[in-house]
Image: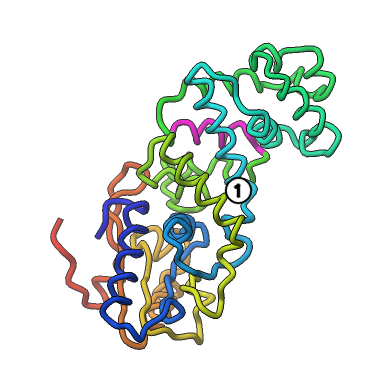
Amino acid sequence: PTSSTGIEAKYVLARLKDLRVSSLSLSYKDFAVLYRLNAQSLPLQVEFVLNDIPYYVRNEDNIATNESLERLIAILRLKLALDNGQQPAAPDVVLALRAYFKSASYSEPRRKLDALFREKGNFWNTIRSRTFYEILPNALTSNLDEAIVSIAQAKTLPSTIAIIAANFKQIHGMAESLEEALHKQKPLAELSEVVANLDYGIEKFVCNMGDALEKAKEYKTGNDYDNGVKLLTYFKSKGLQWHTVVLLSCNEGIMPRRGEDLESERRLFYVGMTRASANLVISYVDNLCEASIQPSRFLHESGFALPKS
């Protein structure tokens, strides 16, 4: 067991490194990490990118092509600048505005906004200026000002992301999902739940995730199918096998996933367990979104002796 998904990703990385050291004949292509939901790959990708571990993940989940993540980081950079009494960088402001207004992604408004915020005027005065409203007329009737004030006043990463998820609708796949995780108990349904459990403060998150994103883009990581660790869902692992397989976050609500047919989930878990030809590593977490979460019932059913809490 590990305390949260952020620590779990570090644990998986350490286990893979240890296994390679103990058996020099193994290469990264001999490992696979399986999970129930695609969003669970995010913490792993960050650790793999920052530690130069080759891997493969489906393109839709690759952090190198994740616009939502890029926009999220930009909004958090904007917040940090405001917190420190500094003027936010123009590229961050433009990305934040693209996360709020669909029209801000069109080429002409985007060009004008970039030029406007590069003039280094006061940020608050600029977003309340006539020139700004001429570029984005719908800003006149929006709640952008209030949303940014709320973000600037937020104290923690989860609370900041909750505000972003509620207001910045162009960050696709994040709206309302954190609230669902906290109040409706739908763990890891979307990107924001994973972010909320990385054990990072805002500055550390921006630094680590920003570095990982830039490095992933530069080196086009996540596409090494022939030589890298496979990051796959249980579904995509059917018919395949590896020397060592890690089953990630084997917890109630994740595996089995809440609301799914229990017998189908049980068969899916069996598929995951039987993908390993030599080593099977099973991981689960103790906490999710600051709430205690139980190990999967499938672990007990399979005869695994779990440590007493």
- The percent position of residue 43, horizontal first and vertical second, equals 44, 55
Q: Which residue is identified by label 1?
A: 173
Q: Residue at x 81, y 33 (%)?
A: 111
Q: Residue at x 39, y 47 (%)?
A: 198
Judge left or right: residue 209 versus residue 247. right
Q: Is residue 218 above or below residue 158?
A: below
Q: Front-most of 84 and 6?
A: 84
For the C terminus, the quadrant is bottom left
Classify 271 as above or below 177. below
Q: Is residue 86 left or right of residue 130?
A: left
Rendered position, 304 above or below 83: below
Q: Is residue 136 visible?
A: yes
Choose top left, top right, bottom left or bottom right for residue 28: bottom left
The percent coordinates of residue 159 (x first, y second) are 44, 31
Q: Does the magenta-highlighted stretch encompass residue 165?
A: yes
Q: Main secondary structure of the magenta part?
A: helix
Between 17 and 74, the one lying in front of the other is 17
Residue furthest toward the left? 308
Label 1 packing within 10 angstroms: few (<14), some (14-19), many (20+): some
Q: Position of residue 296 (x, y in %)?
A: 31, 64
Q: Amino acid at mark 1?
A: Gly
**Residue 122 falls in which quadrant of the image?**
top right
Residue range highlighted in magenta:
159-169
Residue at 53% in and 20% down = 82
Instruction: Determine if the magenta segment contains residue 161.
Output: yes
| Residue 274 visible in the current orientation | no
Residue 272 pos. (x, y %): 41, 77
Q: Secondary structure at mark 1?
A: loop
Kindly indicate the quadrant of the structure image that contains residue 265. Answer: bottom left
Q: Is residue 108 left or right of residue 89?
A: right
